[in-house]
């Protein structure tokens, strides 16, 4: 994403929501699938694009710095929409995704590229990750 000087001045200053490259995974049918995104956080709006094994997609949604809640739609180019909701407590964004037309849903976790994935795996040893993501996202 290339920002003009005016667009850069509106970028979010909360360190939980840095604009730029993000990485992570979503869980579907019990297995992790990697995802890469380029996100922009500004004035409560979340926009961007990315790709995963399904294909390329566009992201549009919002976020709140007061409580860390986030929500967005991921629209695959020439394909379907996937709806995400989650929260950011300082270790990336956790939550659930769903495709209502086919009642599919699962968990996800994304974080700014450059943070070590190992920082986010500690919780898995205590509670199965999908169970944790689904349980915590229901409170969102």
Image (spheres, helix red, strand yellow):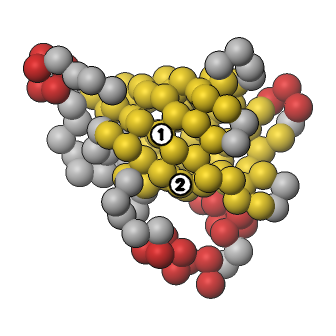
**Secondary structure of residue under mark 2:** strand
Q: Is residue 89 visible?
A: no
27 is higher (above) or lower (below) than 73: below
Estimate the x, y position of residue 5 in percent, counting from the top left. Answer: 11, 20
73 and 77: which is toward the camera: 77
Name the residue rendered at 43%, 54% in the picture: 111
Q: Please identify the quarter of the rendering in which residue 20 is found.
A: top left
Taking the image as shown, residue 90 lies to the left or right of residue 50, namely left
Q: Crowding near pointer 2: few (<14 within 10 Å), some, many (20+)? A: many
Q: Which residue position holds label 1? A: 37
Taking the image as shown, residue 131 lies to the left or right of residue 23, namely right
Q: Are marks 2 and 1 in contact (CB under 8 Å)?
A: yes
Which residue reaches farthest right? 102
Quadrant of the snapshot with the N terminus: top left
Estimate the x, y position of residue 69 in percent, counting from the top left. Answer: 45, 43
**Secondary structure of residue under mark 1:** strand
Decide which of tag 2 and tag 1 comes sooner along the chain: 2
Q: Crowding near pointer 1: few (<14 within 10 Å), some, many (20+)? A: many
Estimate the x, y position of residue 25 in percent, counting from the top left. Answer: 60, 54
Picture disc at residue 115: none
Name the residue rendered at 63%, 41% in the picture: 52
Taking the image as shown, residue 80 lies to the left or right of residue 111, namely right
Name the residue rendered at 62%, 77% in the picture: 124
**Disc 2 to disc 1, C-alpha distance:** 9 Å
Q: Which residue position holds label 2? A: 24
Name the residue rendered at 52%, 80% in the picture: 122
Q: Is residue 117 visible?
A: yes
22 is higher (above) or lower (below) than 83: below
Estimate the x, y position of residue 55 in percent, counting from the top left. Answer: 67, 32
């Amino acid at each position: 994403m290339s920002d003009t000087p005016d667009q850069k001045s509106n970028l979010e200053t909360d360190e939980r929501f840095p604009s730029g490259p993000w990485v992570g995974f979503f869980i579907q049918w019990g297995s992790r699938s990697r995802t890469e995104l380029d996100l922009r956080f500004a004035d409560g709006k979340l926009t961007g694009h990315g790709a995963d094994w399904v294909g390329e997609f566009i992201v549009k949604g919002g976020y709140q710095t007061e409580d860390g809640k986030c929500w967005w739609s991921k629209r695959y180019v020439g394909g379907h929409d996937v709806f995400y909701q989650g929260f950011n407590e300082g270790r990336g964004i956790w939550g659930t995704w769903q495709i209502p037309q086919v009642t599919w849903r699962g968990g996800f976790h994304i974080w700014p590229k450059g943070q070590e994935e190992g920082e986010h795996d500690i919780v898995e040893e205590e509670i199965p990750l999908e169970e944790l993501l689904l349980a915590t996202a229901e409170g969102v």
